Image (cartoon, rainbow, N blue to C red):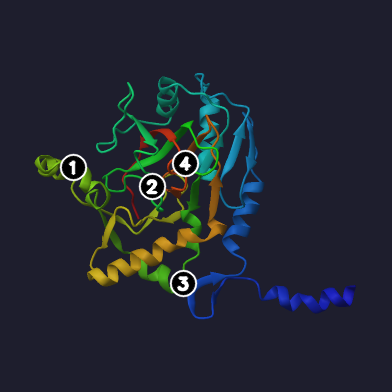
Amino acid sequence: MTDTLRAEKPLYAGLAGRATLHGYPINVGPDPYVAAERERLAGLSWDEFAVRPVSPALGAEVSGVDLTVDLPEPVIAEIRRALHEYKVLFFRDQPLTSAQHVRFAERFGELEVHPFIPSRTDHPALCRFEKGAETGGYENSWHHDVTWRECPSMGAVLHAVEVPEVGGDTLFADMYGAYAGLSDELRARVADLDAVHDFMQSFGRTVADDQREAMRAAFPEVVHPVVATHAVTGRPHLYVNRNFTTAIAGLDPDESRALIDTLARQADYPEYQVRLRWEPHTVAFWDNRAVQHYAASDYFPQTRVMERASIVGPRPTR
């Protein structure tokens, strides 16, 4: 047995990092980032509630806390800390009213009012997504929310009001890991680049012709770093997405689009993902900088109703 183990050691030594797959732009092999993140997260402890990690690099289910009541500040502070550590938190069996939803989200900062997604509730800051046979869902693409704002949201609280029996899951991808997974050459290439973000790319078709000039004045194109530094954790993360990023500043259109696509594809690795199977009154609270999300549009024509409150964040910086 000892001789067998000794003979296998050189094989394990070759698994220290990722490798490309036969010339394709695909990485295979164990990911050192995921291994380190699993170990880091396993060392955390919590006083105010129980936390169960649901994937190696991101995502945790929180139990022992009731979001329908006004929680004491130590609990809110620990939820905030858990959010920054796990990047997305899941809470089950939280039958929030719209007012309770808004009140909980407000504990983490000022709420934003989305100019293109109607509230359909008594609370302007609460976006309501009602999808079914008459309204298909087009959310199925990886993105950070509202990167076209000068100060995009730092996080969002999403409550499942009505969900299909099967389908309609939401996936989250770790943008720290997406950055860490870049080759040294690509990290050096994007380190000082900026990206242009514009609401018109996704929401332009919803704006009436007579409102376009006013909406453009209210929400001009903005420029954010391709690689941003998280305002709380200080960790670098990718900050581009196909929904709202229209160009990489200083590059020609073809090169720009190719680079955006290359960076966006980092979210495709399951090693950086966690998938949430919704149940009625599940709540997800995600860090809109540390993760991108993808709502699987696989439930048509069944009904899916969600409500979201988003918290204003600081302007992204390098």
| Alpha carbon separation for disc pair 2 and 1 | 18 Å
Quick one: label 4 or label 2, which is nearer the N terminus? 2
| Alpha carbon separation for disc pair 3 and 4 | 28 Å
Q: How dense is the environment of label 3, judged by Cα within 10 Å: few (below 14), some, or many (20 and up)?
A: few
- Mark sitting on residue 286: 4
Q: Quadrant of residue 193?
A: bottom left
Question: Which of 247 and 189 lies nearest the eye of the viewer?
Answer: 247
Identified by mark 3, the residue type is Asp
Q: Which one is in front in this view, the residue at disc 3 or the one at disc 4? A: 4
Q: Quadrant of residue 18?
A: bottom right
Quick one: label 3 or label 4, which is nearer the N terminus? 3
Q: Residue at x 85, y 76 (%)?
A: 4
Quadrant containing the N terminus is: bottom right
**Left or right position of 120 against 91:** left
- Mark sitting on residue 139: 2
Q: Residue at x 48, y 23 (%)?
A: 96
- Mark sitting on residue 207: 1
Circle 3 is placed at which residue position?
184
> Where is 66 relative to 33, above or below?
above
| Alpha carbon separation for disc pair 4 and 2 | 16 Å
Quick one: label 1 or label 4, which is nearer the N terminus? 1
Identified by mark 1, the residue type is Val
Q: How dense is the environment of label 2, judged by Cα within 10 Å: few (below 14), some, or many (20 and up)?
A: some
Mark 1 secondary-structure assignment: loop
- The answer to whether one can see residue 269 in this image is yes
Identified by mark 4, the residue type is Trp
Quick one: label 2 or label 1, which is nearer the N terminus? 2
Residue 159 x/y as whole percent: 46, 32
| Alpha carbon separation for disc pair 1 and 4 | 28 Å
**Left or right position of 273 against 246:** right
Q: Quadrant of residue 237?
A: bottom left
